[in-house]
Image (cartoon, coloured by chain):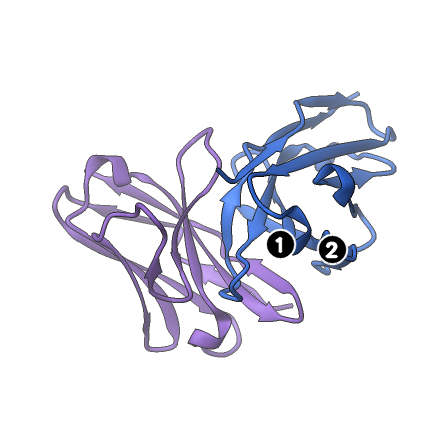
Amino acid sequence: EVQLVQSGAEVKKPGESLRISCKGSGYSFSYYWIAWVRQMPGKGLEWMGIIYPGDSESRYSPSFQGQVTISVDKSISTAYLQWSSLKASDTAMYYCARQDGDSFYYFDYWGQGVPVTVSS
Amino acid sequence: QTVVTQEPSFSVSPGGTVTLTCGLTSGSVSTSYYPSWYQQTPGQAPRTLIYSTNTRSSGVPDRFSGSILGNKAALTITGAQADDESDYYCVLYMGSGIWVFGGGTKVTVL
């Protein structure tokens, strides 16, 4: 069974760093792109970026380029989303999602989400 | 920057039909954008409904269907049920490994 299991809820202060994770199981992790999606409180879904675990190639939405870093450790089937200096506006739910492997360009499995709260 | 447009909200009667659309502020949506649709209820992760314009994801009831209508992608719910009350999002593949979500449509069944 394909599963994406994300790390737990985070409460941080502005200026702190953070890394959240997304662990894949039940499939060949290296061969499927993993995307990150933001959902701010009461708002819609926003595509942030994507990474290919096989070679760590990544792409970013222009809105998020330079604001976050997406990385991966394929040896432990885990993708990461990280911030070097959080802002209150980073408060949101963050989902990871697997892109399908058949070039239909959609997201077939989703993690449960990580709520991140940034407050002084 | 390209913006993907969706109606903010729709209301449908139980058993009725509703069509949600997904457009672009500049240009037309075609199958080349591989439109996909996701359902999200409060507090839950999104659920994949439709991909590649009109293919239902595994386990999705056939009352959900996807298409291209004019210059937009469309999601039609035929015979709406109470548990279809959700937020619906489309996402378009823009090429070069970039996707853009629409703003979402809140569907109320009453």
Q: Amino acid at mark 1?
A: Tyr
Q: Residue at x 71, y 23 (%)?
A: A10
Q: Is residue A42 left or right of residue A8?
A: left
Q: Earlier in the sequence, mark 1 or mark 2?
A: 1
User: What label does residue A32 carry, if any?
Assistant: 1
Nearer to us in this view, B88 or A28: A28
Disc 2 chain ID:
A
Label 1 SS: loop
Residue B78: x and y in percent read: 18, 54
Count every numbered label the image shows and give the total: 2
Chain B color in figure: purple
Crowding near the residue tagged with mark 1, few <14, some 14–19, many ≥20 C-alpha atoms within 10 Å: some
Q: Are marks 1 and 2 on the same chain?
A: yes
Residue B26: x and y in percent read: 53, 76
Q: Residue at x 58, y 33 (%)?
A: A113
Nearer to us in this view, A21 or B27: A21
Residue A82: x and y in percent read: 79, 39
User: What label does residue A54 carry, if any?
Assistant: 2
User: What label does residue B2 carry, if any?
Assistant: none
Q: Is residue B38 left or right of residue A52?
A: left
Q: Residue at x 59, y 37 (%)?
A: A25
Nearer to us in this view, B22 or B31: B31
Crowding near the residue tagged with mark 2, few <14, some 14–19, many ≥20 C-alpha atoms within 10 Å: some
Chain A color in figure: blue
Q: In this orientation, does residue B64 appear?
A: yes
Q: Amino acid at mark 2?
A: Gly
Disc 1 chain ID:
A
